[in-house]
Every structure is written in C-alpha cells, then in structure tokens.
Amino acid sequence: MSKKDFKANFHILTIRTMLKKCFGEALWLKVFLADPHHGILHGNRVRKGCLKLLQKMAVAELSKLKKEGQKIDAKNPLASAIAAVEIAALFHDCGRFNDAGEVKFEEQGKHHELSAARTKVFCQYFGFLKALPFVEEAVLCHDFNSQKTTPHLKPPKSMIGKLVQASDQIGWFHPGSVQRTLAYNINLKIPFFDPTFDLVTRLNWKIHVQSLDAITVLMHQLFGSCKADRFGIKAAREKVETYKEQLEKKILQAAHKQGVKKEIQKLIEDFRRQQKKLW
Ligand SMILES: [Fe+2]
Ligand SMILES: [Fe+2]
C-alpha cells in the first residue's frame, strides 16, 4: 500500500460548503464552524489523526477496514471506508452544540446522539446511504472510555468506528490537551482544583455526568484506560504510551501556575496507586 491509497476524500473548505448547503442557517452550525474546543477545527484534527493512523494500521486491521468498505462501495472499498471515517470524524462532536447553538453541561452526556442525528441528515442529503450505518456507529461510540467511566456508551465494533474513536481518544493524552481541558473548564466555570473533593469522589468521577474540578478531568486523562476497547488500533495504543510523560509534566506546570503543585503531585501519586480501579 502506498500513501496514495490513504488519501483524503474531503477538503475542509468543501466540507464547510457542504455543511452550509445541507443545514442552511441553522444556529448550531454557526457555532460549530467557529468553536475552538469541539467545533469543526477539532473534527478536522480528529479526521487528520485518522488519516495518519490509517498509514500505520496492521495488515489484519486494514483488511477488516476494506471489508467494511466493500459494503459501502464494492468498486472502491478503501476509499469509501476512508470517506465514512472522515465524515464521522468531522461530525462526531457537533452535538455538543444544541439547536440554539449553546453548550450546556447537562446536555453533554447525550452529545453523541445529537451528533449522530445530524450526521444522518448529512449522509441522507448527499446520498451516502450505504456508509450511514458505519458513520452512525462511529459517531455514537466515539466517546467510549471504559465500562466504568462511560457506562452509557458502547465500544465500536467496526474498524471505521475504532479509527475515529482512537483518533479522538488519543487527544486526551496529547500534552497539548491540558490547555484545551483548562480552557473548556473555565468556559463552564469549573475551578482548577477544589480541595474539598476526596480521592474516592475523584476516582469515581464519570465523564459528562458530574463536574468536580478540572484537575479530576486531567487525572482521568493521564491515568485513563488504554485498553483495546478504547484504542482498537494497535498503533494508537503505542502512540498514547509515548505521550504520558510529557502530559504529566504539563499538568504539573499548570498546577505550579495555580500555586498548588505539591497538592497535585500528591494527587498524581494517589491516582497512580489506584489506577486500575479507574476502569
Ligand atoms: Fe465527544
Ligand atoms: Fe472529540
């Protein structure tokens, strides 16, 4: 396989035009096109991450992907599977913005469902009907972390879904994610560190269900599951391991700026000891 086989089907400018054509003046679309946290820029980052992972896929993973592509378009199995991956990646978080274009914490737990509903409208509008079951599954499953932390979600079965999930979940471990998490939490008026929360409460935190403080989210980023139901692509599991050291340093730098470095150093050690209880 050469790099040419893994080329993208979409260009970000084409996607913007397609989105406007399909959804017109919808309020959520305006916000989605501009939002720095979970908007189209993030979707595009995840899409590009998928294209990179594609080039590193194991033979067995690639052959499963092609079989899925065959069900979409038997003449162009790989290209059609990649197109499904790209659409799912671009749309996966659009449901974070409700129809009024607002981001409400209490609605975030169901953002995958709203994202999937909008993806369905898009696929039907442009006639990507055979790709729809794969794209829908990928969007619905993208946020699965582990049975314990995301009990309301299922891991994806398809390679198309595993690619989108792995690319999105790698973002949790990327050292640059610290700034993104902090900015997102500031937006939601969630404090950096609230010492009144005990360790058990922090260990039992559930994504999208509770809001404690930003440092709890960061601890779950650093010590979250790296198992195959979260990272179904081997290359992604390996990539994540290379991020952890730098991610820990970035968290400690942020803690230092907030004047709570000692407290966070202790919290990191506590989490490290209890790590397996998290999943
Ligand atoms: Fe998401
Ligand atoms: Fe995402």
Image (cartoon, grey):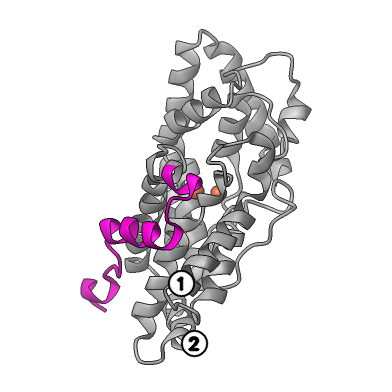
Residue where numbered disc 2 is placed: 71
Q: Position of residue 71 (x, y in %)?
A: 49, 87
Inter-mark Cα distance, 1 to 2: 20 Å
Magenta highlight range: 1-30
- How packed is label 2: few (under 14 Cα within 10 Å), some, or many (20 or more)? some
Name which quarter of the figure residue 16 lies in.
bottom left
**Is residue 13 found left or right of 23 in the rendered image?**
left
Marked residue nearer the N-terminal end (1 or 2): 2
* Foreground of the two, 28 or 229: 28
Name which residue lies at 74% across and 20% down: 197
* Foreground of the two, 253 or 73: 73
Q: Does the magenta stretch include residue 132?
A: no
**Is residue 180 found left or right of 116 in the rendered image?**
left
Residue 26 in sight from this viewpoint: yes
Q: Where is residue 33 in the image (x, y as percent from the top left)?
A: 39, 45
**Is residue 69 found left or right of 107 in the rendered image?**
left
- Secondary structure, mark 2, is helix
Residue 233 in sight from this viewpoint: no
Name which quarter of the figure residue 59 lies in.
bottom left
